[in-house]
C-alpha cells in the first residue's frame, strides 16, 4: 500500500521533491496557498534566469553558509545532474560568459516551470490550490484555511522565506513552529541592497550608474562582479555575495566596511606605474584614459578620499585597489532576493526531519542557510528536494 505524502508549499524545492518521489511508493499531495505553483520561481526569472552555476562541485559547495550544510545534497544532485535532468525534460541549457547556466535562448521561465509540471502530472501528483496551512490540531492533523484536515505518513514543509511577499513568501508560518517548541531564528535580508550615506552631490550625478568589473571585500570574503549605485546605497552581485559578512558586522556593530577594488586585474604597483608614466597631466584624465575608470568610479574616488590622496600617485593607486566604504544598513526584508533565518539547522537532522516532530520535514529557504545569487539558490533548492526524495524512496 502506498504511503501518503503532504507537501506544504509549491515553490521550487517542493517541485523538485515531488518530481523525484517514487509514484509507486507514495501518494503525493501538494498544498499551495496561491492559485498557481512556482510564483517566486517565475519572478526570479525576470532578472535573468540563472538555473545553476557551472563551477566544479568542490567550489560550488563553498558558496553556501554554512558550507557543511549542503555538501551531501549537492553531491547527491549536482549542477551537472541538474543540467542533465533539465535536458531530459526538454529544457536544454548553455553556460554563459559568467559561467552561470541558463535555459537556451528563447526558453522563458514559464516554459521551464511547465516542463516540471508535466513531470508532476506523469507522477500523478495531486495539487490543491488556495490551501493555506494554519497549524496543527490536538490530533496532530494539519489545518488549512478550508474545512479540511489531513494526517499523512510524511509531511514536508516547503514554505519559503520572508522576501517577496507578493509571491506568498511572507514567513508568517514561523510562529506556528515556535509554538511547537522548534528552534527558530528571526528572518534577515540577504542578497539585498545595502545602505550608504552618500554625499548629495555625488548621488545626484551618479544615481543608477553601474560599477562594472570590480571586486568587493568584506572580512575574508572577496567577490568580483558589479554593483549599481542607488539612492539607498549599492545593489548587485558583487555586494550580494558578501551578505554573510555584512550581516554579521551590521548585527554586531551597526555598521560595516567594504573595500572596493576598481581594477581587480591589475596590482597596486601596476596601477601606480600607469599613473606615473602617463604623459597626461590631469589626474582625472589619467585614470580615465590610462586605467579606463568610469565617471562614476572617478566620482566615487573623489567623494571618498581627500584631494591630497587623489593627487598622490601612490595613495591614489592604493585607494583604487582598496577603496573603503561604510555600509550602514540592510534593505527591507521584502526587497531582498532571499532571506536567512527561519528554522534553525539544529532543529533538523541530516535529512531535514524535525527533531521534535517525527515524519515532519522542512526544506528550502525556510531553513536558516545562505547563498549568493547566480544560480546557487535554485541549485540548493533542487539538491535539497532531490536529496530528501531519494532518502524517502530508499527508506519506504
Image (cartoon, rainbow, N blue to C red):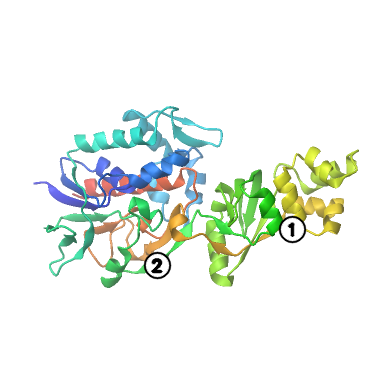
Q: Position of residue 354 (x, y in %)?
A: 28, 62
Q: Residue 4 carries which label?
A: none
In front: 285, or 28? 285
**In the image, residue 203 lies at what x, y percent?**
66, 54
Q: Give the percent coordinates (x, y) of residue 232.
A: 58, 57
Q: Name the residue under label 2.
A: 185
Q: Name the residue under label 1.
A: 304
Residue at (44, 54) in percent of width and height: 338
Residue at the extreme left: 1
Where residue 38 sits, quadrant-wise, is top left
The residue drawn where x is 15% and y is 57% is: 146
Foreground pick, 124 / 236 = 236
Q: Residues within 10 Å of mark 2 (few under 14, many from 20)?
A: some
Report the residue at 37% width, 63% height from top.
342
Residue 157 appears in view = yes
In what element is the residue under mark 2? Answer: strand
Q: Which residue is drawn at 47% across and 38% down?
A: 48
Callout 1 touching callout 2 (CB < 8 Å):
no
Q: Using the image, determine if residue 314 lies above or below residue 379.
A: below
Residue 278 located left or right of residue 88: right
Measure the C-alpha gap from mark 1 to mark 2: 36 Å
Amino acid at each position: 500500500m502506498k504511503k501518503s505524502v503532504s507537501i506544504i508549499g509549491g515553490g521550487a524545492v517542493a517541485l523538485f521533491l515531488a518530481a523525484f518521489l517514487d509514484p509507486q511508493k507514495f501518494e503525493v499531495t501538494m498544498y499551495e496557498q496561491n492559485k498557481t505553483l512556482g510564483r517566486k520561481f517565475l519572478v526570479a526569472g525576470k532578472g535573468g534566469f540563472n538555473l545553476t552555476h557551472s563551477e566544479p562541485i568542490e567550489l560550488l559547495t563553498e558558496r553556501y553558509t554554512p558550507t557543511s550544510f549542503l555538501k551531501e545534497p549537492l553531491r547527491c544532485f549536482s549542477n551537472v545532474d541538474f543540467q542533465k535532468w533539465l535536458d531530459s525534460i526538454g529544457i536544454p541549457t548553455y553556460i554563459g560568459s559568467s559561467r552561470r547556466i541558463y535555459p537556451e535562448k528563447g526558453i522563458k521561465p514559464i516554459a521551464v516551470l511547465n516542463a516540471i509540471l508535466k513531470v508532476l502530472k506523469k507522477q500523478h501528483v495531486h495539487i490543491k490550490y488556495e490551501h493555506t496551512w494554519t497549524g496543527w490540531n490536538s490530533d496532530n492533523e494539519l489545518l488549512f484555511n478550508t474545512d479540511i484536515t489531513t494526517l499523512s505518513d510524511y509531511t514536508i514543509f516547503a514554505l519559503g522565506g520572508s522576501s517577496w511577499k507578493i509571491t506568498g513568501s511572507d514567513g508568517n508560518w514561523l510562529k506556528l513552529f515556535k509554538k511547537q517548541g522548534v528552534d527558530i531564528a528571526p528572518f534577515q535580508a540577504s542578497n539585498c541592497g545595502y545602505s550608504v550615506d552618500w554625499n548629495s552631490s555625488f548621488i545626484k550625478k551618479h544615481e543608477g550608474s553601474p560599477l562594472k568589473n570590480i571586486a568587493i571585500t568584506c572580512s575574508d570574503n572577496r567577490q568580483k562582479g558589479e554593483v549599481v549605485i542607488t539612492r539607498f546605497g549599492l545593489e548587485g552581485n558583487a555586494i550580494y555575495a558578501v551578505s554573510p559578512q555584512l550581516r554579521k558586522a551590521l548585527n554586531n556593530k551597526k555598521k560595516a566596511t567594504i573595500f572596493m577594488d576598481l581594477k581587480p586585474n591589475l596590482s597596486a604597483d601596476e596601477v601606480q606605474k600607469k599613473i606615473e608614466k602617463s604623459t597626461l597631466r590631469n589626474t582625472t584624465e589619467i585614470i580615465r584614459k590610462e586605467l579606463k575608470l568610469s565617471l562614476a568610479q572617478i566620482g566615487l574616488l573623489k567623494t571618498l578620499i581627500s584631494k591630497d590622496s587623489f593627487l598622490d600617485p601612490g595613495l591614489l593607486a592604493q585607494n583604487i585597489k582598496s577603496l573603503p566604504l561604510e555600509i550602514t544598513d540592510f534593505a527591507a526584508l521584502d526587497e531582498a532576493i532571499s532571506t536567512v533565518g527561519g528554522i534553525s539547522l539544529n532543529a533538523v537532522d541530516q535529512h531535514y526531519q524535525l527533531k521534535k516532530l517525527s515524519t515532519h520535514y522542512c526544506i528550502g529557504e525556510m531553513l536558516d542557510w545562505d547563498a549568493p545569487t547566480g544560480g546557487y539558490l535554485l541549485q540548493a533548492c533542487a539538491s535539497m528536494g532531490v536529496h530528501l526524495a531519494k532518502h524517502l524512496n530508499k527508506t519506504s
